[in-house]
Image (cartoon, rainbow, N blue to C red):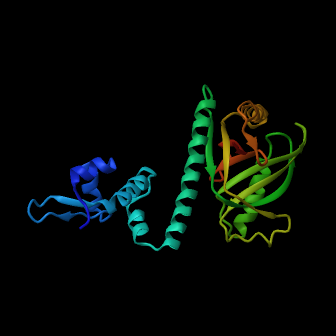
Amino acid sequence: MKSMMTIKEFSTKTGIPKSTLRYYEEKNLLQSVRDQESNYRMYSADQVSLAKLIASLRTANIPIREIQLYLKADEAVQKQMKQTWIRTIKKNQRQLAISLRYLESNQGEEAIYIFEKPPEKVIWFKAEAPVGQFTQAFIFRRKQLIQHNITIKNTYLRYLSGNRKSVHADIGFGVPGNADASPIPEAFTENMEKCLCIGLSFNGELFRIEAAYRKLILYCMTHNWTPTGSILEWNRGGRLDSTDIIIPVKH
């Protein structure tokens, strides 16, 4: 007959509190049998490794429902589930590292923020104007897109070259994924990928925006954030009266 242990003995053997063992039973993860005379919960020595596995998965923050599925699955499926958990944990680990680095580097820089920008389809146009004077170009292109029934979600300006008197830039419009800009000859489309960004809100007059560019670039250089794309002026929701300077980065 297999060696049986009371819940107290099993708890001592596995290092798992009795309350947790009862919880595992409630969730159909680890079942005990009842002693006919005392009605005590009884566990076999064979269940020790299973109990430790369940406790380890919970420590790794694996949800109860997924553990239930894992215990019922065959070896191949279990292997796939483990790989999925590993990818998720690595992603969370990366996010924690980013959060810690941001908080450590952001002392006294509350205006600078970090965020993960979702993917977005952007329709771009070439433009030229003095620093801070691209409003008319945005208005003109916005009207063009609206005439073609294209909804605008965000607007962007991407500096290309020039000086204060004459800046060459791309002006862009974030649009739904099914938007078709082909009827507009001057338009070109880009699918911006999801990316980590450092941002700085700018509320001054646009001809003074160069100082915000310099501040954001200096912040990235000082704290070893590596740019992975062009610096952008970003107007959330397509408005032109509130600008953020953002730059895609990696840590």
In the picture, the quarter occupied by the C terminus is: top right
Q: What number of labels is visible?
A: 0
What residue appears at the point 76 percent right and 64 percent down from the top-left corner? 144
- Residue at 79%, 40% (x, y): give it: 132
Between residue 194 and residue 205, name the one nearer to us: 194
Left or right: 64 with respect to 116?
left
Task: State the image coordinates of residue 195 (x, y, percent, origin top left).
Answer: 68, 52
**Could you tell me residue 218's position as x and y percent?**
76, 31
Place residue 84 in its image quadrant: bottom right
Among all residues in the image, which is located at the extreme front? 1
Is 167 left or right of 56, judged from the image as shown? right
128 lies above or below 178:
above
Horizontal placement of 108 versus 188: left or right? left
Which residue is at the far top? 108
Q: In front: 146, or 202?
A: 202
Q: Residue 54 at x, y = what percent?
A: 38, 57
Q: Which residue reaches farthest left?
A: 37
Horizontally, residue 212 falls left or right of residue 90, namely: right
- Indicate the quadrant containing the N terminus: top left, top right, bottom left or bottom right: bottom left
Task: Reply above or below: 207 against 26.
Answer: above
- Residue 183 rendering spot, x and y as whole percentages: 80, 73
Q: Nearer the viewer, residue 116 or 186?
A: 116
Name the residue: 76% across, 69% down: 181
**Up-down: is 4 above or below 247?**
below
